[in-house]
Amino acid sequence: MCRLFLKYVSLNIMGQMAYSCYTLADTFFIAADLGAEGLAALNLAFPFVCFINGIGLMIGIGGATKYTIWKSREEHRTANRIFTQASFLVFVFSALFVLAGLWGAEQLVTLLGADDTIFYMTKTYIRVLLLFSPAFLINSLLQCFIRNDGAPSLSMAAMIGGSLSNILLDYIFIFPLRMGILGAILATGLAPVISIAILLPYFVRRKNKFHWIACRPGISDICAISSSGFPSFFAEASSGVVMIVFNMIILRLAGNTGVAAYGVVAAVSLVVVAIYTGLSQGIQPLMSRSFGLSDTAAVKVLLKYAVVMMLFLSGVIELIVFTGASPIAAAFNHEKNRLLQQMAEQGLRLYFISCPFVGFNMVLSIYFTSVECSLPARVLSFLRGFLLIVPTAVLLSAVMKIDGVYLAYPVSEFVVAGIGLLLYGKYKKKNGVHKSGLLFN
């Protein structure tokens, strides 16, 4: 069990980290070419990346979770029907995003509050991103199903391949071709296309055990997929909402330079969250399979392994961020803007106090999803979303200014972790596994 856990988790963490590096590449190259204004434009536009990824994860993880459970019970037609319905959802959301990109990009930028200096750059990024949304959604669907189909190495290779191509294309489009922010988003949009190309041989060689079947769109299947994947969607979408709120507060307090500093913090945060996402997605197929086989002991062991791994990773991340805040901020401050440097350093140190709480909440949420206990997973997702952090940010920013904005994240995640422990204890007592409510008893 331990070896299998390490295999799935390590492959997913590496893949997710590589996948998240496209954001760092965009941030780094845009900062080098366009300075603080480019960083501000990127940070205003980035919530839409979160929304698209959230839909992709909802369909991919939700569908793959149901697929794995039905497959473990030898219900192969039902499992294939789940894949078909998930594919239908991808088609519907792709069409909606593309239409928004064609006719609604300018209105979206206006709602975000971009001023004249960054309006055009922000609009360009959002429009091209939305037009590439089908590639992002298809990529998420295939990666999740292939990973749960017993090929995590291929899923990781696709994520790494897409991210490396994004970094290379970022450099080519932004510097030799001088395409500015258009080059950055083109590189980002082509990354999932390359990732899909890496995954396609899995189908050409007919190694996949999931297939499309003839069936009508079914409300019950779509609801089941959405329910299982909703925590993942809400976590990503809430990140986008929180970024919008933080951007608005920081714009009022410190202008474009403050938003640029927050862009550095947000870019690093996406890599950190990717580590915890890799951990949680790595245990999901193992937990779902064990739950489908009614092996509650294996589910319990996997949860214990995940929490121990999360604590170790959190310690390493905290050490790197707290000791390396200055060089991290400097890497994105090519203009050597002293105010930007100072604000980014302070933001990094405050924001990442949250690491162990974020990791614990993500692991616990995927645990509830994997054992088909969707209500606690949804509760944690709502609490981790804007329900707590937005009012906390508004309150703390009124008292502590920008420091209060950054501290809102660890404060709200700490509260959610406490509520998560209570929900876990209640769930275990209800299912008769133990009576103490402690995590591993």
Image (cartoon, rainbow, N blue to C red):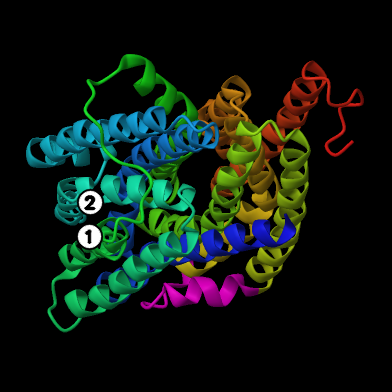
Left or right: where 390 falls relative to 243: right
Left or right: where 313 falls relative to 179: right
Look at mark 1 in the image and give the residue it sits on: 193
Q: Position of residue 37 (x, y in %)?
A: 28, 62
Q: Report the residue that reaches farthest toward the bottom.
A: 176
Q: Position of residue 423 (x, y in %)?
A: 73, 24
Q: Are marks 2 and 1 in contact (CB under 8 Å)?
A: yes
- Residue drawn at point x = 49 percent, y = 29 percent: 228
Q: Is residue 89 magenta?
A: no
In the rendered structure, which amino acid carries the disc numbered 1? Val
Give the image quarter of residue 141. top left
Range of residues picked out in magenta:
324-339
- Residue drawn at point x = 65 percent, y = 39 percent: 290
Q: Position of residue 257 (x, y in %)?
A: 38, 59
- Residue drawn at point x = 35 percent, y = 73 percent: 164
Q: Report the residue that reaches farthest toward the left.
A: 103
Q: Nearer the viewer, residue 394 or 389?
A: 389
The mark found on residue 135 in the picture is 2
> Where, quadrant-wise, is the N terminus in this rendering?
bottom right
Query: Which is more N-terminal, label 1 or label 2?
Result: 2
In the rendered structure, which amino acid carries the disc numbered 2? Ala
Magenta span dominant secondary structure = helix
Q: Secondary structure at mark 2?
A: helix
Q: Nearer the viewer, residue 404 or 359?
A: 359
Left or right: where 65 falls relative to 198: right
Q: Is residue 331 magenta?
A: yes
